[in-house]
Image (cartoon, grey):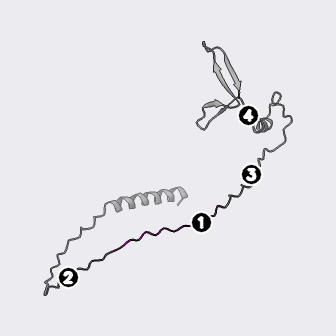
């Protein structure tokens, strides 16, 4: 038998087993049993009352304030693969140069988590007829 025929055989076998398990008769519901007992004597129950008292006591506790330690210096290490050929933003054109520049400089605009354009290093305003865009740095 080839592997293709063998896998088809096992596939059909699995499908048939699922169909047969679905056709099984459901288990019969349990029949409730009624238990009858005869009480021969009655016992008198004596009730006891429990009384709880709550006392509030004031206690003075001195709290010692310990200063929180300063967080350790955080270091970010980024592997960009190679050194940039030039760091001038006006002359950069390769991917490794642009990746370095994005870490150094902030653009006039940036994208938020929903990919909407939001102010980065500047705010913008349009004129009345929407033909000019004016950026104002913070």
Task: Label 3, secondary structure: give it.
Answer: loop
Pick out the residue farthest to the bottom.
40
What is the spatial separation of the Cα atoms under label 4 and label 2, in whole angstroms? Answer: 84 Å
Q: Residue at x 78, y 44 (%)?
A: 80
Vertical order, 13 against 98 (above or below): below
Structural distance between the alpha carbons of marks 4 and 3: 21 Å
- What is the distance, in whole Å, between disc 3 and disc 1 at their CAs? 35 Å
Q: Main secondary structure of the magenta part?
A: loop
Please state the horizontal and vertical placement of residue 129, each as a whole percent of the image.
60, 12
Residue closer to the observer: 125 or 138: 138
- How far apart in space, not on screen, are marks 1 and 2 (Cα)? 52 Å
Residue drawn at 64 percent across, 21 percent down: 125
Residue named by callout 3: 74
Q: Is residue 128 above or below residue 38?
A: above
Q: Which residue is mark 1?
A: 62
Question: Dot 2 corresponds to which residue?
Answer: 45
User: Which residues fall within the magenta stretch?
Assistant: 52-65
Q: Is residue 86 left or right of residue 17?
A: right
- Distance, label 2 to label 3, CA atoms, is 73 Å
Query: Disc 2 vs disc 3: which is toward the camera?
Result: 2
> In this figure, which residue is indicated by the disc labeled 4?
106
Q: Residue furthest top?
A: 129
Could you tell me which residue is drawn at 56 percent across and 67 percent down?
61
| Spatial CA span between label 1 and label 4 | 50 Å
Q: Earlier in the sequence, mark 3 or mark 1?
A: 1
51 sits to left or right of 13: left
Mark 2 vs 3, N-terminal side: 2
* Circle 4 crowding by C-alpha within 10 Å: few under 14, some 14–19, many from 20: few
């Amino acid at each position: 038998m080839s592997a293709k025929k063998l896998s088809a055989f096992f596939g059909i076998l699995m499908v048939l087993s699922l169909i047969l398990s679905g056709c099984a008769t459901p288990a019969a519901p349990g029949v409730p049993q009624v238990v009858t007992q005869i009480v021969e004597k009655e016992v008198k129950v004596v009730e006891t009352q429990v009384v709880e008292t709550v006392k509030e006591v004031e206690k003075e506790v001195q709290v010692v304030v310990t200063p929180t330690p300063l967080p350790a210096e955080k270091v970010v290490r980024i592997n960009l693969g190679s050194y940039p050929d030039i760091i001038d933003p006006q002359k950069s054109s390769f991917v490794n140069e642009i990746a370095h520049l994005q870490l150094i400089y902030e653009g006039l605009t940036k994208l938020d988590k929903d990919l909407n354009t939001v102010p980065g290093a500047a705010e913008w305003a349009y004129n009345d007829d929407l033909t000019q865009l004016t950026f104002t740095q913070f």
